Image (cartoon, helix red, strand yellow):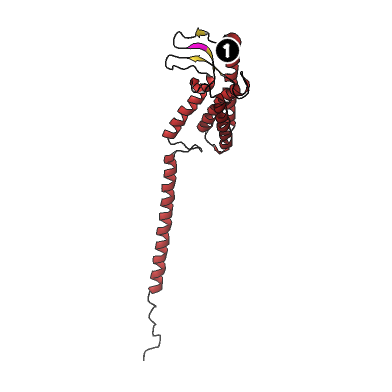
Amino acid sequence: MAVLAVVALCVYLVDQIAKVLVVSNLYEGQQIEVLGQLLQFHFVKNAGAAFSIGSGSTWIFSIVGVGVLGFVIWYAPRIRSTAWAVLFGLLLGGLLGNLTDRLFREPGFGVGHVVDFLQIPLLPAIFNLADVAIVSSMALFLILTLRGVGLDGRHARDEDEDEVDADDVDAEAVDADAEAADAAAVDTVRPAPEPHDDKPQA
């Protein structure tokens, strides 16, 4: 739980600080090359979801964001794995970052525009650090699922081995009971000893 909270807080703070710096130093629509064409800062205000999807439906995404946020917070106490805690921390921090924009930025509460400023050639859309955290959490989800890592940190094969060990113990107990039953049966049918004639012979 502590790992989840720390990761979420770090993601949220880095995302919000980056957005404040972008808004303070760039004008909307401005582009700056950071690593040539590989990475550019391109300041835009997004009224939709991640990667500018669904522009014009901000209030819907705000409601969905609050719902997902509530689910993550409710589900968090069940997590016992560090990797899953990092995953939910990335998701929570990213959701909070974009939800803060939608709730408190212009043009109004619940319909605020998200600040996007990262652009790379591989993607046609412009995004922000909160989007990066959300996508990273999804990638980590796939990795953990494919590896069979549960919320408690155990692998599925470990659980299978435990089940096999339990079956072996049960089988040994059954065999021991059977042997004890056989021994008891032998004692029951064992013939009584013949009486000896202790009288002196003439």
In this rendering, the count of numbered labels is 1
Q: Residues within 10 Å of mark 1 (few under 14, many from 20)?
A: some
Q: Hey, which residue is sitting farthest left in the picture?
A: 202
Q: Which residue sits at x=43%, y=57%?
A: 173
Q: Is residue 132 visible?
A: no
Q: Is residue 137 left or right of residue 102?
A: left
Q: Quadrant of the N terminus?
A: top right
Displayed quadrant of residue 92 = top right
Q: Classify 44 as above or below 159.
A: above
Residue 198: x %, y % from top left: 40, 85
Say if the magenta span includes residue 38: yes
Residue 177: x %, y % from top left: 42, 61
Q: Is residue 132 left or right of residue 101?
A: left
Q: Classify 105 as above or below 87.
A: above
**Residue segment shown in magenta:** 37-42
Of 180 and 164, nearer the camera is 164
Q: Quadrant of the C terminus?
A: bottom left
Displayed quadrant of residue 79 = top right
Residue 43: x %, y % from top left: 53, 12
Q: Which residue is the site of mark 1?
A: 22
Say if the magenta span includes residue 165: no
Label 1: element kind: helix
Q: Which residue sits at x=48%, y=25%?
A: 136
Q: Is residue 125 visible?
A: yes
Q: Hey, which residue is sitting farthest front in the picture?
A: 56
Q: Which residue sits at x=61%, y=11%?
A: 24
Of 155 and 177, nearer the camera is 155
Amino acid type, callout 1: Val
Residue 185: x %, y % from top left: 39, 69
